[in-house]
Image (cartoon, rainbow, N blue to C red):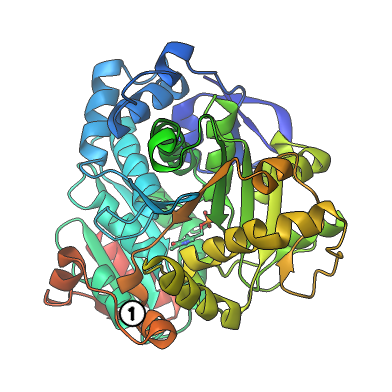
């Protein structure tokens, strides 16, 4: 498989180059596969449906063809995914796709663990370690740290702003040993990012050490997220005649979005033949993409802080990939879109719990709410032209997706992506429903581990000195 670039279609690099470069520094563009191979009908109609790892292997294979042999790919998948997504119907037409069963209890484990093993694979035979530097404002750092922990040939340095992330997040970052180290920086997230960026452009440092990033825009984080879309769509198809009394439902993936990597992965799955009829792009008050769908104009903003903070992105990188894959008209036919504010998010957690008994986290809640509105009158209002294009007000965007009738005729099932375990946001959930979600063991245990974070000043000189002494 060759990979091209969103900004220059003449670019064609192999998988290894795309992974190790992260992005195309020459153009500032993002890598995308040049084609999306359709999977065999026999595989898509397998009964019972394939396991998650079988789906992962089958989908990954064409993307690494000629660079990672099958037996090695199988080992990578086995090692990356000792856990699987779970699909939980919470009412006859709503299935929650739980993506939080990995070690850090958030969906980023799916992308980060695959990326870590692929990078380690491509780093074999080198006589020095590859050093990953990552600045984090919370969740990314723990997913990346955990994904690379004990992965051979690579070490990771995580920088986070001291006192500015939640105590649980801090424990998740700072308690690794061995090849993953955390620096608590006496400054802001922007200071952390500046330190990392300065290190990457420091020629003296680069001459001594092999440095790399583990950015969310890396193609090796995007591709594996498409695995769970296909896996889930195939299982919903097989379960819906029994659970929902629906043969061949339209399956609508409802995605709580920030940087739009997760949703872009869903688009890749759909192109490869996953039986997904449509998507709902659901955001918090950072509604740059819903505005674009509503008005046709793409205007990035500064991000604003919300209760679903992993979605606080005002300039989503993957917009560039979406527009490389689809025209705006195609997006308007494929997507419904929706945004809500903090009050709407709290109400969604409460309503979801009252109506279904399910405890949803503030990110998944934004998606659940979008679907709840669509199926309870929203689609009819859209079809009647009764939704106005007012981007400044929360709610649905005025475009009418091609699959609208399947919802009004009750032939659609939503797959609501639940991207984090609710216990990671216990205080918000408590605020919404008056009780705390129960804590999974692997989160509980982290609270008792010893903190190894190293205090760090925010000036580049101190940081560089530490790197030189410790890498
Ligand atoms: C990162 C994250 C998101 C947003 O995913 P994108 O791929 O950036 O759209 C949503 N929910 C949680 C819990 C996350 O960590």
Q: Is residue 31 above or below residue 418?
A: above
Q: Does any portion of residue 315 appear in the rendered image?
A: no
In this picture, residue 319 sits left or right of residue 240:
right
Q: Is residue 442 above or below residue 207?
A: below
Q: Is residue 226 left or right of residue 123?
A: right
Q: Position of residue 115 (x, y in %)?
A: 37, 41
Residue nearest the observer in this picture, 429 or 75 = 429
Residue 325, position in %: x, y? 70, 35
- Taking 451 as reference, is 241 left or right? right
Tell me the quadrant of the picture where the C terminus can be found. bottom left
Q: For residue 231, which quarter of the picture?
A: top left
Q: Residue furthest front?
A: 245
- Identity of the residue drawn at 40% across and 71% down: 138
Q: Does residue 467 show up?
A: yes
> Which residue is located at x 75 percent, y 39 percent?
402
Q: Position of residue 97 (x, y in %)?
A: 41, 50
Tally the marks: 1
Element type where label 1 sits in the image: helix
**Residue 379, image x, y percentages:** 73, 54
Residue 353 location, quadrant: bottom left
Name the residue carrying label 1.
Answer: 426
Residue 5 sits above or below residue 186 on the image: above
Tell me which residue sits at (37%, 76%) in the image: 425
Q: Is residue 449 above or below residue 417?
A: below
């Amino acid at each position: 498989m060759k990979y091209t670039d969103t900004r220059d279609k003449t670019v064609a690099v192999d998988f290894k180059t795309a992974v190790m470069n992260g992005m195309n520094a020459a153009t500032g563009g993002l890598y995308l596969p040049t084609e999306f191979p359709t999977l065999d009908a026999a595989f898509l109609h397998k009964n019972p449906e394939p396991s998650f790892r079988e789906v992962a292997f089958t989908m990954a294979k064409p993307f690494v063809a000629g660079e990672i042999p099958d037996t090695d790919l199988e080992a990578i998948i086995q090692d990356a995914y000792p856990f699987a997504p779970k699909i939980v119907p919470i009412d006859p037409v709503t299935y929650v796709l739980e993506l939080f069963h990995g070690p850090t209890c958030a969906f980023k484990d799916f992308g980060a663990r695959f990326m870590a093993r692929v990078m380690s694979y491509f780093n074999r035979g080198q006589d020095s370690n590859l050093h990953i530097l990552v600045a984090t404002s919370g969740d990314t750092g723990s997913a990346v740290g955990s994904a690379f922990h004990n992965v051979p040939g690579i070490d990771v340095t995580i920088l986070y702003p001291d006192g500015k992330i939640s105590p649980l997040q801090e424990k998740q970052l700072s308690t690794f040993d061995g090849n993953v180290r955390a620096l608590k920086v006496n400054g802001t997230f922007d200071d952390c990012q500046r330190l990392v960026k300065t290190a990457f452009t420091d020629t003296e440092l680069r001459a001594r050490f092999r440095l790399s990033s583990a950015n969310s825009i890396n193609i090796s984080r995007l591709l594996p997220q498409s695995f769970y879309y296909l896996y889930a769509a195939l299982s919903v198809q097989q379960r819906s005649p029994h659970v929902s009394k629906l043969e061949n439902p339209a399956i609508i993936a409802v995605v709580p979005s920030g940087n739009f990597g997760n949703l872009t992965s869903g688009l890749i799955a759909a192109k490869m033949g996953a039986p997904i009829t449509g998507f709902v792009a659901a955001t918090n008050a950072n509604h740059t993409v819903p505005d674009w769908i509503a008005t046709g104009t793409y205007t990035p903003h500064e991000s604003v802080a919300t209760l679903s903070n992993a979605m606080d992105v005002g300039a989503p990188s993957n917009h560039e990939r979406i527009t490389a894959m689809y025209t705006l008209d195609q997006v308007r036919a494929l997507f419904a879109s929706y945004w809500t504010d903090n009050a709407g998010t709290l109400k969604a957690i409460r309503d979801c719990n009252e109506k279904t008994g399910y405890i949803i986290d503030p990110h998944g809640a934004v998606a659940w709410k979008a679907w709840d509105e669509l199926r309870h009158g929203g689609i009819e209002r859209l079809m009647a032209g009764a939704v106005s294009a007012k981007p400044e007000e929360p709610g649905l965007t005025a475009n009418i997706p091609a699959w609208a009738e399947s919802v009004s005729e009750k032939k659609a099932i939503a797959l609501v992506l639940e991207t984090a375990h609710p216990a990671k946001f216990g205080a918000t959930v408590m605020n919404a429903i008056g009780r705390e979600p129960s804590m999974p063991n692997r989160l509980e245990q982290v609270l008792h581990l010893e903190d190894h974070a190293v205090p760090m000043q925010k000036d580049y000189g101190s940081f560089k000195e530490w790197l030189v002494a410790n890498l």
